[in-house]
Image (cartoon, rainbow, N blue to C red):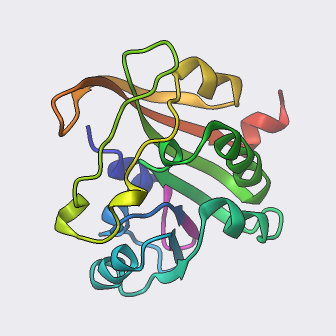
Amino acid sequence: MNPYTYVKEATDPDKSLLSLCCGIGLELEFLQTQDITAIDLAQQYLDEVKKRCPQAKTVLSDALEYTKKQPDNSVDVISIIDGIEHMDKKSGIKLIKEMKRVARDQILLFTPQGPGEDGYLKNEPHNAWGIEGADHFQTHKSGWTVDELRDQGFEMLLVANDVSQHGEPYQAIMARWRKVLDLYV
């Protein structure tokens, strides 16, 4: 499953994208839009984003703190691909609320759902993408389930069985929240 195709489909030359917990920016390659802001806590990852997507504005920041400072309805699309599970549940719920406030159109969220009732999938530090020095950012702090994301107003675009890089089975969840749909709920 490739969550990046959903980001590509959601953006066009006239749309802005805010990529939270962007990592090395894999979803930012080959986008038509030039209006991209990429947020991450690891400078090493942002350095890779600039190589992959030179037009992106990169910001070294916590996703929640950055989003809280943004004006209402100030970006078309927000993506958080493999990010929300790296924060505790309370912060993740706050981030979802802030993303809904900031997004003009939609939020695309990808997260693994582990086999347990709480959706947690363990992730040990592992020099992600062959980059040393940011392992502490790779630890999962929460798990998310399809039901929890639905309760937050997300629709499931895809739920597929997969296996983690550590050999653990999980469900890959690609979810979308759309402002226009939320206005009618």
Q: Nearer the viewer, residue 36 or 12?
A: 36
Percent position of residue 70, x then y: 77, 70
- From the viewer's perspective, tell me whether residue 177 is left or right of residue 54: right
Q: Is residue 1 above or below residue 127?
A: above
Q: Quadrant of residue 169?
A: top left
Which quadrant holds the C terminus? Answer: top right
17 in the magenta segment? yes
Q: Is residue 73 left or right of residue 115?
A: right
Classify the position of the N terminus by image quarter: top left
Q: Residue at x 70, y 57 (%)?
A: 103
User: Vertical placement of 177 versus 55: above or below?
Assistant: above
Query: For the point 35% across and 84% down, which residue is it?
Result: 50
The span shown in magenta is 10-18
Near-viewer residue (169 or 102): 169
The spot of residue 51 in percent (x, y) is 28, 84
Indicate whether 9 appears above or below 142: below
Q: Residue at x 58, y 73 (%)?
A: 61
Magenta segment includes 28: no
Instruction: Tell whether 132 sits left or right of 57.
Output: left
